[in-house]
Every structure is written in C-alpha cells, then in structure tokens.
Amino acid sequence: MTDLTEALDKVLHLATLVGTDLTRFQHESGLTASRAHLLWVLGAVGPSTQQSLAAALGVSARSVTGLVDGLVASGHVTREPHPTDRRATWVTPTVPGAAAIRELVESHEHLARQLFGHVPADQLAVFIATLDDTITTFARLMEETS
C-alpha cells in the first residue's frame, strides 16, 4: 500500500464513520441531514426567506419548499409574512426549532473538542489546510466527471 492509497483509505474510513454518526443522529433527532442543515443555517442567519435559504444551502427553491414543509409539519419552523416584502415568506424557528438549533450547535462544538481538542495548534492548522486542498481537488474532479 502506498502512502497515497493509505491516505485515501483513511478518508474513506472517516467518511463511513461520519455517515454512521449521521444515521444515528437522524434516528435520535427525527431530523434528516437536509432539515438539520436548514435549521443550522437559520441558527446562523436568523429568520430568512425561502429564496435566501435555497441560496445558502445551494439547492433549488423547490427543494427548500419541501424541507420547510417538513419542518413546519414537525413544529420546528413557521412560515410568516415577510415584514417588508409582501411577496416573500419568512421562515422562522419555533421554540422547539430554536432548541434543536441550540442542540445542533452544542453537539457540534462538543464533537469538535472531542476530536481535535488534544491536537496541537500547528498540527491542526496543517490538517485543516490539507482538508481544504483535498476538498477543493475532489470538488474539481467531481465537476470534471459531470
């Protein structure tokens, strides 16, 4: 095994572990990854239009409509008239939605501390730079094959 294939094998193993954890999260929370991501964005930017959520998530307006429909049905968000644009709908977290957002943020920070809290700052900086390069390269390769 070369260093290159060993690195790829470790990335694939990490992807499998992350996928398993995501499946566990979905089962425990009742939220799909896409709905959790939408809540995450709402937590970061506050109440938003569906159009701005679609842009932030990099998905179509139709996809956001489906996600918001599901989150309205589960009681995580409401649709309200936009305060200044009568053509737009304002997506706002409910009390349970805000609690879910807080839990997402707290669990994210907790996992980051568990995974990387012991890693020296200089090693973490190199790891982050390597991940950035890997993500950029992989995204380019994906674009070339589509």
Image: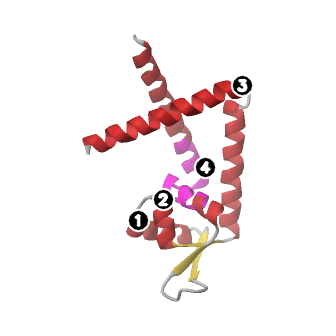
Q: Is residue 5 magenta?
A: no
- Work out whether mark 3 precedes mark 1 in sequence or the reverse, and give the earlier one: 1
Q: Which residue is mark 1?
A: 63
**Residue 24 locus on image (x, y percent):** 56, 43
**Residue 66 locus on image (x, y percent):** 43, 68
Magenta residue span: 22-40
- Work out whether mark 3 precedes mark 4 in sequence or the reverse, and give the earlier one: 4
Amino acid tagged 1 = Ser
Which type of secondary structure does the marked residue at label 1 adopt?
Answer: helix
Amino acid tagged 3 = Pro
Q: Which mark is residue 28?
A: 4
The crowding category of the residue bearing disc 4, from other C-alpha atoms within 10 Å (few below 14, some 14 to 19, many at least 20), is: few
Q: Nearer the viewer, residue 63 or 57?
A: 57
Amino acid tagged 4 = Glu
Q: Which residue is mark 2?
A: 57
Amino acid tagged 2 = Leu
Report how far apart the C-alphas of labels 3 and 4 lie in the structure: 33 Å
Of badges 2 and 3, nearer the viewer stands 3
Q: Are marks 3 and 4 in contact (CB under 8 Å)?
A: no
Which type of secondary structure does the marked residue at label 4 adopt?
Answer: helix
Residue 42 sits in quarter: bottom right
Q: Which residue is mark 3?
A: 120
Q: Which mark is residue 142?
A: none
